[in-house]
Image: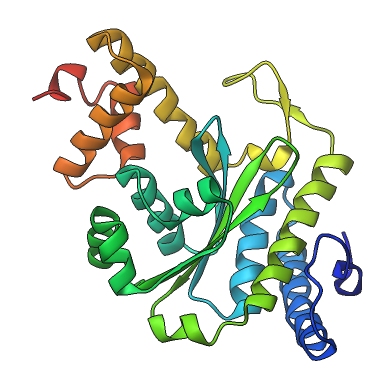
Amino acid sequence: MPSPSEEHSADAPRASPEDDRAAVGVLDRFWDEYGRSVGADASGAELLPTRLARACAYALGVDGAGLSVLESDFRVPLGASSDMASHAERLQFTQGEGPCLDAVSEGHDVAAGAADLRRRWPQFADALFSETSYRAVITMPLSVTNSTRGALDLFFVDEARLGTLRLADTAHVSAAIVRALRDADALDRPVAQSEWTDEFIPGWLTGAAANHRRVVWFAVGMTMARFDVSGPDALALLRAYAYGHGDVLDEVAAALVEGRLHLKEIQN
């Protein structure tokens, strides 16, 4: 695992000496908190993203942080700093809109307070404001590997914090997270997640959140077969049902796969 001083590299943005000194302090807090979480629970690589998200939230002083990647334009959560941050990710995926999706597709950071959230992503904003305490979001796209795109979401209860968070600090912490994931990918033996794929994938991509999201794939396939529709149309049907019933898409998919919800109810 790289030390804080090693983060001043091509992966981290260069800034003024004053900015660099401040960033080192943030990275010290980041790695200290990460080290404490590893010491408290020495479980396997699947918990790496959750540890990184918690260390990120602690170091930057934000109210929540979440990590995700895109697999064939399908958002897969890796880990979050809290249950509320995890729920905010599920809401964004359920609505099919939000700053994370835009940041990854456009390739740049997206910052939004309450008014911007309502204007740009009204359905997501309604769900976020009614089901969480968050009122602002910053999302940074991550290039985890040459073929894997990801994102770091930062959530705020007080939107005034958007103007006080140093962008240099968020950039350096993002670079540290990417470095940690890359190092784990290179050093740890990949595991075959045979339930989903015959290919070997990084251990950090086999956590509970990622596996739970992949259930949606099964539900989409079931819906495609039942109604003879395309994948995007099947996903849209499931999203519409979840939205209409005040539920998150992940739980609707799990109910379908487990037989607690029948496909004939999706179009009703």
Place of residue 28 in the rendered image (x, y in percent of width and height, measured from the top left) = 79, 79
Q: Position of residue 143 (x, y in %)?
A: 69, 48
- Quadrant placement of the N terminus: bottom right
What's the colour scheme? rainbow
Q: Quadrant of residue 114?
A: bottom left
Q: Quadrant of the C terminus?
A: top left
Residue closer to the observer: 1 or 160: 160
Q: Is residue 253 left or right of residue 123?
A: right
Name the one closer to the observer, 268 or 7: 7
Judge whether 264 appears above or below 59 on screen. Answer: above
Image coordinates for residue 52, horizontal then vertical, percent:
67, 61
| Total residue callouts | 0
Residue found at x 72% / y 50%: 43
Residue 158 in view here: no
Q: Which residue appears farthest toward the bottom when viewing the image?
A: 18
| Residue 152, image x, y percentages | 58, 58
State the residue at coordinates (36%, 38%): 250
- Residue 106 seen in the current view: yes
Seen from the viewer's position, the closer of residues 95 and 245 is 95
User: As drawn, is 180 to the left or to the right of 73?
Assistant: right
Residue 230 found in image quarter: top left
- Horizontal arrangement in the rendering, residue 32 relative to residue 265 (left or right): right
265 over 164 or under it: above or below = above
Q: Is residue 236 above or below residue 156?
A: above
